[in-house]
Amino acid sequence: MINRIINYIILAGLIVCTQFVTAQDEIVIEHISINTSEKEYAPVYYKNGIVFCGVNTNNEALTYIDDETGKQLTDIYFVPIENGMFAEKELFSSELKTSFHDGPITFSKDGNTAYFTRNITSSKTLKNSTKIENKLGVFKSIFDGEKWGDVMACSFNSKEYNVGQPSLSSDGKRLYVVSDKSTGYGGVDIYYTVITDGICDSLINLGERINTDANEMFPFFDANNKLYFSSDRPSVFGGLDIYVSKLYENKWNAPYIMDSTINSVYDDFSIVFNENETEGYFSSNRTGSDDIYKISVKYPEFNDCEELVSELLCYEFFE
């Protein structure tokens, strides 16, 4: 009996020690300078800057108005980052611009292939895009070194439901999208399609581990097999919150909600990270409109570390 108590004390001591020696990451959130009183959201890394969705404030005559907000529809913009500073934003591509909703967008690792959201019908002869059935779809374009080439519709697009918010895996083999297909778990679900020889296959639902009867949106699949997404399922925060799940042996771990460093009582969504997860961006309407925030992650430094030695430890537990 005494030996058993001693074993418990030793084990408890080991657990407590691990809590004290665990170093904490330092996460800093910054409201970046490119934000305006209009929408800026869905940032992605592209070459020496970021590409994002925003509202055109120049009041172009051929841009339609969103009935819900009374604002102009979104375009895709690019902002270079020079010496850590954001330069002036510019239209990402005149070849990809329409008079309707454009974006979000995602890129291949080399930056030469893009998949993006837009309305399936983009004809300028339509008098009012909001008074007809004009579903969203995902389209593909390839950069030839000078301009973005012909826009090609993905085969899974449909006039019966919306598909959008694409996120391409770093190996280019999977494209994650969202859709309000009636065959889902309810609301908007996250799907993926396998890409073979540049061609997308049919949509596959990620399943009930990820999707619920709420809305799951804005997927981002990073280089470390982690899927970040937003959902308006009930939570301790409220609105859209950002969750993360890891793909392990072709199965998704139970998603966990990110803490209050990222999530708020407002809508928080469309998060992305760089490959080493030291920096990222996400969107939130916590200041009244959709804005982009920068994430800086500082990992603790370890000095004079000895080489890790593998030890085989044996514990005996009693009921």
Image (cartoon, grey):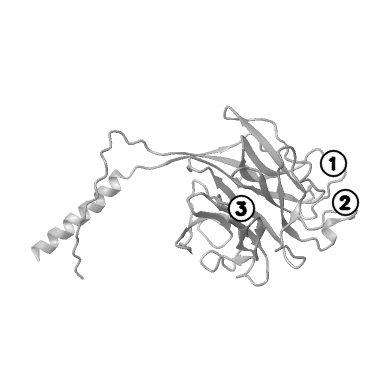
Q: CA distance from mark 1 to mark 3?
A: 29 Å
Quadrant of the image containing the C terminus: bottom left
- Residue at the far left: name it: 2
Occupied quadrant, residue 68: bottom right
Q: Position of residue 90 (x, y in %)?
A: 73, 35
Q: Position of residue 73 (x, y in %)?
A: 77, 49
Quadrant of the image containing the N terminus: bottom left
Q: Nearer the viewer, mark 1 or mark 3?
A: 3
**Mark 3 belongs to which amino acid?**
Ser
Q: In the drawing, what numbered circle is on residue 60? A: 1
Callout 3: 10 Å neighbours few (<14), some, many (20+)? many
Q: Position of residue 99 (x, y in %)?
A: 82, 48
Q: Which one is nearer the viewer's eye here, 226 or 293? A: 226
Q: Nearer the viewer, mark 2 or mark 1?
A: 2
Q: Which one is nearer the viewer's eye here, 139 or 144? A: 144
Mark 3 highlights which residue? 167
Sequence order check, earlier mark of 2 and 1: 1
Sequence order check, earlier mark of 2 and 3: 2
Q: Secondary structure at mark 1?
A: loop
- Residue at the far bottom: name it: 183
Q: Which one is nearer the viewer's eye here, 193 or 55? A: 193
User: Residue at 71% of width from left, 59% of height from top?
Assistant: 154
Q: Secondary structure at mark 2?
A: loop
User: Residue at 20% of width from left, 56% of height from top?
Assistant: 313
Q: Secondary structure at mark 3?
A: strand
